[in-house]
């Protein structure tokens, strides 16, 4: 059976993506770091609706945790593989650069960029060996496309993910594995709840923040059979804000 792994699947965009993939009939592995209650809620919502879901807790920036969790999952699922990987976990640690502590620079890069590297490298061989290939969707951001003041760390990490997406897409295409990035603008989640929404939404041509479900619909499409010939793309979802 083909499973999906969604990193940071306990809240926000990751939660909506888990629900969407499950509605598409895909069994979902919900990764999270610390919020067990939120992750269990997503898991229950999926199983109550007749879908299949399981929790897998690890910090995406820690390769030893990733490998231990995925080793034990693989031992329990000898005939299955993870065919859909959504590298979604991410954090913000905003500050103007001249005041940015080392810790905030490294933590943002560790989770977004190194996390992508550790998990994708671990899962790629099986995806590339299987006849049915795989789908990798990386969560970038408008901040990675245009750069945002106060987010030099976050913009750097999200821009790096775009370069990595385009390069990996070329390595994996011949094995029927597609690799794409999604670049959301302002979406209503915990990550944006401290932002002045009333002020910021006036900057958005659509005059509103996006919904997590709207991003999940795009990720669902990129994971579908219909998207088999789309790879190396960065798709913006931002209400017209560039
Ligand atoms: P969120 O509501 O803050 O949720 C973040 C998720 O990431 C949570 O599930 C959290 O798990 C998980 N996470 C954080 N650090 C982790 C780690 N080290 N290991 C494993 N999981 C970790 O964020 P969001 O708004 O849904 O954002 C999701 C992604 O979209 C991020 O990559 C973000 O940069 C990107 N994005 C968001 C927006 C937006 O406007 N919201 C715009 C552009 C891009 P716990 O529950 O355990 O803490």
Image (tube, rainbow, N blue to C red):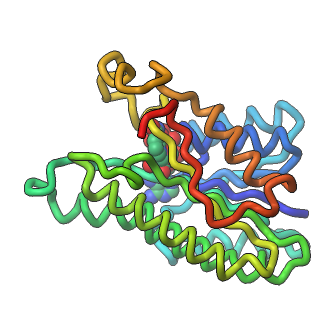
Q: How many tags in the picture? A: 0
Residue 34 at least partly seen: no
**What is the x, y in percent for residue 2?**
86, 62
**What is the x, y in percent for residue 163?**
48, 70
**What is the x, y in percent for residue 111?**
42, 62
Q: Is residue 227 above or below residue 52?
A: below
Q: Residue at x 52, y 74 (%)?
A: 117
Q: Is residue 70 left or right of residue 199?
A: right
Give 207 or 211, whichever is nearer the viewer.
Answer: 207
Q: Is residue 224 left or right of residue 170?
A: right
Specify the farthest residue to the left.
98
Q: Which quadrant: the N terminus?
A: bottom right
Q: Residue at x 18, y 48 (%)?
A: 95
Which corner quadrant of the image does residue 165 belong to?
bottom right
Which corner quadrant of the image does residue 67 belong to?
bottom right
**What is the x, y in percent for residue 151?**
26, 50
Q: Is residue 45 left or right of residue 166?
A: right
Q: Is residue 138 above or below residue 203?
A: below
Q: Residue at x 38, y 28 (%)?
A: 193
């Amino acid at each position: 059976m083909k499973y999906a792994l969604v990193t940071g699947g306990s809240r926000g965009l990751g939660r909506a993506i888990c629900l969407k993939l499950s509605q598409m009939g895909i069994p979902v592995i919900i990764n999270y770091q610390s919020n067990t209650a939120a992750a269990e809620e997503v898991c229950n919502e999926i199983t109550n609706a007749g879908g299949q879901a399981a929790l897998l807790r690890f910090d995406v920036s820690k390769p030893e945790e990733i490998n231990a969790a995925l080793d034990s999952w693989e031992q329990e699922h000898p005939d299955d593989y993870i065919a859909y990987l959504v590298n979604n976990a991410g954090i913000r640690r905003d500050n103007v650069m001249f005041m940015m502590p080392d810790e905030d620079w490294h933590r943002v890069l560790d989770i977004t960029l190194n996390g992508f590297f550790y998990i994708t490298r671990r899962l790629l061989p099986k995806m590339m060996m299987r006849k049915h290939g795989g789908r990798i969707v990386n969560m970038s951001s408008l901040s990675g496309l245009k750069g945002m003041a106060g987010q030099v760390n976050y913009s750097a990490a999200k821009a790096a993910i775009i370069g990595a997406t385009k390069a990996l897409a070329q390595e994996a295409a011949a094995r029927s594995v597609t690799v794409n990035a999604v670049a959301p603008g302002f979406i209503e989640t915990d990550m944006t709840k401290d932002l002045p929404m009333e002020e910021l939404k006036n900057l958005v041509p659509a005059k509103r923040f996006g919904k997590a479900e709207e991003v999940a619909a795009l990720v669902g499409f990129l994971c579908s059979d219909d998207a088999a010939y789309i790879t190396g793309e960065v798709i913006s979802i931002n209400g017209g804000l560039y």
